[in-house]
Image (cartoon, grey):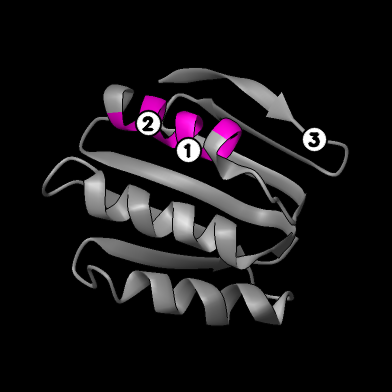
Amino acid sequence: MNISEIKTKKASVYAKNNVVYFKGDFDLLDNQNFLDPFFKEIIKQMTDKITFDLSETTFMNSRVINSFVSFFLNRKSGSKVILKVNKLTPWQKTSVKILAKLDPNKIIIEEEVK
């Protein structure tokens, strides 16, 4: 899977192979034109496993979290999702832990230090 990078002034997201990289401050007001089309393309291209690297994400508002929820509910049945978080960024583990409850057997959290 390869999806070109999309950017705002404070954030960027792109996919390479089976990893989606989120970097920066995601305080988006308009996910319909930013993340939602990106997630739809991921669903089209994804295989049985995908990793979201959130370790360089400094903030995500509730609209971004809702885009993740929509992705998890619409992804290919049975696909495994790994969420990489930065162990030193407390909000990530808390927010991502809630997302993982949507499918605890298939959504896995990995912690790293960046």
Q: In this view, does 104 lie to the left or right of 85?
A: left
Looking at the image, which residue is at 55% across and 69% down? 111
For residue 43, what is the image quadrant? top left
| Magenta segment boundaries in residue numbering | 33-43
Q: Distance between the residues labelled 1 and 3?
A: 14 Å
Q: How crowded is mark 2: few (under 14 residues within 10 Å), some or many (20 or more)?
A: some
Q: Nearer the viewer, residue 105 or 77?
A: 77
Looking at the image, which residue is at 25% across and 54% down? 73
The residue carrying mark 3 is 8
- Precedes in sequence: disc 2 or disc 3: 3
Q: Is residue 76 left or right of residue 42?
A: left
Specify the amino acid type for callout 2: Lys
- Precedes in sequence: disc 1 or disc 3: 3
State whether residue 22 is above or below residue 105: above
The residue carrying mark 1 is 36
**Image location of residue 1, percent across then percent down:** 40, 20
Q: How crowded is mark 3: few (under 14 residues within 10 Å), some or many (20 or more)?
A: few
Q: How far apart are marks 1 and 2 (CA)?
A: 6 Å
Pointer 1 and pointer 2: residues touching (CB < 8 Å)? Answer: yes
Q: What element carries label 1?
A: helix
Residue 40: give its label.
2
Looking at the image, which residue is at 11% across and 46% down? 77
